[in-house]
Each structure stands twice: as structure tokens, then as C-alpha cells.
Amino acid sequence: MCGIVGYIGKNQAAPILLDGLEKLEYRGYDSSGIAVINGQDINVAKAKGRLQVLRDKTGDGNDVKGTIGIGHTRWATHGEPSDVNAHPHLSQSGRFAVVHNGIIENYLPLRERLTAKGFEFVSETDTEVLAHLFEYYYKGDIMDAMIKVIDRVEGSYALGVLCSDYPDSFIAVRKASPLIIGLGEGENFIASDVTAILKHTRNIHYIEDNEIVVLTRDDVKVYNTDKEEIKKDVFTVDWDISAAEKGGYPHFMIKEIEEQPKALRETISPRIKDGNIVLDDVKLTAQDIKNINKIFIVACGSAYHVGVVAKYVIERLCRIPVEAQIASEFRYCDPIVTKNDLVVVISQSGETADTLEALKVAKSRGARILSIVNVVGSAIANASDDVIYTWAGPEIAVATTKAYSTQLAVVYMLAIYMANKLGTITGGQYKKYINELEALPDLVAETIENKDQLAYLASKFYNCKSIFFIGRNLDYAVSLEGSLKLKEISYIHSEAYAAGELKHGTISLIEDGTLVIAIATGRDLFDKTVSNIKEVTSRGAVVMGVTTKGKTMDGIADHVIEIPETSDIFLPSLSVVPLQIFSYYVAAEKGCDIDKPRNLAKSVTVE
Ligand code: F6R
């Protein structure tokens, strides 16, 4: 949420900043701004709306001169989206310009104190407090001011700060909000994530909480709050630059849907060696696994939906009780977690605030934390005992697709791995599951080929006011994701229900023509779901059924979408695909802004 970028080098900063912000727009897109040092002046340009408005206002950045600058794309928290609330924020005298991602929790008392000292606030943001604080504490040394500012503020922040007294450097810091440092030749960068600077460099520093970074054209120095220099390792990012470009597709979402087979292959293949699952990054021993009392899965949104699939899969294979919990609930429910429990944390971004806090709660109670994360070096990855990375590459569309799919793949690998260690599956089952896991990317590719049918169905149903998704067990878990996908990008109201639960109240909403999407792939429960389909069709519902090729839904559902056959536990990876594609085409029919749905942003770093 909110993206920041900073540049110092020999080239004009503004066009580079705008280019970087374009890559970060998925993090927030209600306003944007840049500040550039030119001689002794800091020039600021800000605009409400999409980045294009700022581009138009600044002649694509060419009107804002200077070779050092910072930029920001915003998802509003404090104060409505407007030019004045957009970042960067200037201090009273204009000496400091600040971009900020995160939340300053004690901004109100700080604002009152600064107001009493004569500072005048022009915006409603928490960030403006930071700009004035820098000025208040500045006695000629920017590092001293930074140390004092971060000592005074509570909350989360990634900051880029320009000071007109320092026309050849700028300074940055982070705490619980992401920030990486990009190392170029005669130029250096800061950014919320690597996609913003991938075009310029692949060499980066990860920085820890409250490490202060001073960037000049030829050097980057990192200090602790005692002003001692810290040596940082240089990491080389191997993400393919084309992964962060649309590459001819109309939207990132459909590109990322189509990238799922590749993302799955890259997540699965390196972990299968000589017919065995090898989780190099997991230090859990066989004995540790045997000692697990209970598994909690904690996540938000789609990642939580992966957790619901995981509950069914791990319980079925490992016979360990599993509870899937929404992170924002878990962190405040005084959870009964002990040192004998394993807490699996799932997060694409690795920075979701509720998930990170839930992790800390579990850790403080002694539980072992295993996280499934897509972003290397992210806060959640850093705070975990074990990390299994999904190799989905950058996911730009706000609505997740390939990250969800790769999280599922990791869940399967973890479940099969643990079940093998526990002896709760036979050697034969273990081999069969591994073979099927390896075949999964091809089956997903085959499922994606059915796009035309889904585009046709979308053209028929895009005007629906409300759509229901039903299924049982694993099919129910997939219903949750199908329903979320549809509502977040097409703005059609939809609900996911356990198929057997509908008649306990919600069936009263079914009327003539209501679309019900019934997922009925599981072998054991197919007939049960068919009964539930009959309950809704007899009340006028139109049913779109999703099932495997071996089963027949003719005469049961009005429209049937078929997916390939595999073992039940893997079917969610296939049945989710038509739901993603259907949602995509419905949103396209409605002319929605598919990659940047209203009110949303990726990487939710606020509670
Ligand atoms: C929905 C979606 C969100 C995220 C959720 C968690 O399409 O993307 O529901 O799944 O915000 O985000 P991460 O996985 O980054 O923790």
C-alpha cells in the first residue's frame, strides 16, 4: 500500500521516478507526486488520480529538472485523495520533502505539539507530521534529525527524505514497511519493491528496521541509530524483467492467469529431486513433525482461502488437526497457541500488516512459524523460522491469481512431505502424489485453453446483480476464492456457501434467474452437491457447474465447465482457473478497471 521510489544519479530524476511509480501503481493509485532537488530548491509536483494525471501535469517529468528525487503513489489512509494530501510533503520552510509508506500511529499528539510550536499543517495526512518533525529536530546534521524523528514516531514507515541543504545525497529508512536499495553505476535507488528499478539494476541491499541509508551518486552507506556503519550484502535479483511488463496482453490479470503453468513449474520442479520432495529451506525434522500438536494457518484474503484448502488437504493426508484463521481475527482472539503448534503463515507480499502481527502473536507464544511467501527478504519471511518461497515472479494485478496457485502448490508439497515423514500415507500414495504434482502445470495449461467458453458465459451473465458460489469441502474452499475474484474486479455482489448450508437460510435469496456456480469436483461428495444443485434449480436458479471430465452434469446444470481429472486434493488448482477466467471476462464485459479495482491496492500494510 503506497509505493515509494527514489533516485540519485546523473540523469534527470523525474522521468525515472515516474517510470518507477508506474511499476508501483498496483500499491495505490488514488494520487501521486514527485519532489526533485534542483540546486538549492526542492520542486514538487502532485496530482490526484492516476499516475497519468501527474505525467500530463509534468510533461512526462521533463518539466521538473534535477538529478535527485523521490516519488510516491498513494492509497489514502489519512485524508481523502487530493492534490494537497498527495505525497511528497514539505516541511514548513520547504527545506525537507518526505515520501512515506506506512502509518504514523501517534501523529495526532505530534501534530498538536508541532502546532503549538507554530508549525502550520496544510494536509490531513499523518505524513506531514514527519516533514515538520525533520525541520524541528534539524540542527545542521540530517542524520541526527533522522535518529530523533524515528525515535519519536510510533507505527510503520518506509521514508525517502530530501533536504535542500544536501543537494548531492538523500536519506531513507524503514520500519515494518518494505524498502529496498538499488545499486547502480553512478546512480542509486530506493523503492518499495524491485519491479520499480529492475530496468536499471538487479543488485540490491535489503535493509532492516531502523537502518538509515544515505545515498549519493557513487555510494550507499547504511548506519544504525548509533551512527555506526553496517556492512550489507548485495543480492542479485533474478526476476525476468518481462514479468513486470504487460507484454502485449490487455491486462496483467489475464497475463498472470496464463503464466500459472510456468509459475507452478518453477515452484514445484526445484523441490522434487530423485522422486522425492525436498524442502531445503525447511529445518523441521521428522521428529519435529511428529511432535506437532496442531497446525494453525493464518492469512488474509485469497491467501486465507489457500489456508482453507490447506486445512482439508493437511488433515486428510497428515491426520493433524488444522485451523485456518483470518489473520485480523487471530491476532486479537487471544489464540490458544503453544510451543507444540506449527503456525503456517501465507502471504504473497510478505508484508500484510495483519498477517505480520498475527505471526508475532503466535511467535510470542512459542509456536514455530513456517511461512509461504513470494517476496524474498520481506518482513514475514524475515520473521519466520522456516520459509518456503513461491516462485510466482512479480504479481502486478491487484487480484491475485498466480500467487494463489503457487501457494496451493506449496501447501500440497508441505502436506505430502509431512505425511511421508509421519507415515500417514503409503509409499505408493507418496509416489503417486509426486507424479501428479509434477503433472499439475500441464493440467492447469489444459484448463486455461477453455477460455472461449468462459468468455461466452461471461457475455451471458455479466449483468447479474448477485451470484452464488457453492461447493463442499475442497470445492467449498475454491468457492470462496471464486466469489472473491468475481466481486473484487467486477463489483458484482457474490457469496460463497458450503453447499449443504444454503438451505439453512440463504436459499431464500434464490429466485428466478439467480446464477449459482456449483463446484462439484470431489469424488466422494459429487452426489451430495448434485442434490444441493437440485434444491436451487427447483427454485429458479440457473446453474453453471464446474466438474471433472469423468463426471456428467448434463441435465443437472444449465452450463457445464469441465476440468481435467487428477487426485481430489489437487483439483482446487484446476477448478479455480475457470473461476478466475470467468471473473476476468465478466469484468472486461462491464468495462471495469481490471488490474486496479476501485478502493483496493495490493500489499495491505494497514490494519
Ligand atoms: C485478492 C487478494 C487479497 C490478498 C490479501 C493478502 O485477490 O489479492 O485478498 O490475498 O490481501 O495479501 P498477501 O498475500 O500479500 O498477504
Image (cartoon, helix red, strand yellow):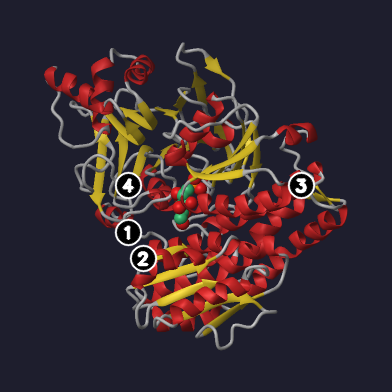
The verdict on label 3 being within 8 Å of ligand 1 is no
For marks 1 and 2, the one nearer the N-term is: 2
Under mark 3, the amino acid is Ala
Q: Residue at x 38, y 65 (%)?
A: 505
The Cα atoms of the two marked residues, 4 and 2, are separated by: 16 Å
Q: Which residue is mark 3?
A: 419
Q: Which of the numbered marks, if any, corresponds to residue 344?
A: none
Mark 1 vs 2: CB contact within 8 A: yes
For marks 3 and 4, give the one nearer the viewer.
Answer: 3
- Distance in Å between CA atoms under marks 3 and 2: 43 Å
Under mark 4, the amino acid is: Trp
Residue at position x 56%, y 72% in the image:
529
Q: Is residue 500 above or below residue 603?
A: below
Three-letter residue code for mark 1: Arg
Q: Which kind of residue does numbered mark 2 sit on?
A: Asp
Residue that protrudes farthest toward the bottom in the picture: 555
Q: Earlier in the sequence, mark 3 or mark 1?
A: 3
In the rendered structure, the answer to whether residue 449 lies left or right of residue 58 reads right
Residue that numbered label 1 is attached to? 598
Q: Position of residue 597 (x, y in %)?
A: 36, 60
Q: Nearer the viewer, mark 3 or mark 1?
A: 3
Q: Position of residue 164 (x, y in %)?
A: 29, 27
- Residue 372 lies, in percent from the top left, at 61, 44
Q: Which residue matches tag 4?
A: 75
Q: What residue would you read off at disc 2?
A: 593
Q: Quadrant of residue 445?
A: bottom right
List x then y, in percent, for residue 24: 42, 49
* Mark 2 residue element: loop
- Which of these two is toward me, 473 or 225? 473
Using the numbered discs, state the Cα–Cα distance from disc 3 to disc 4 in whole angstroms.
Answer: 43 Å
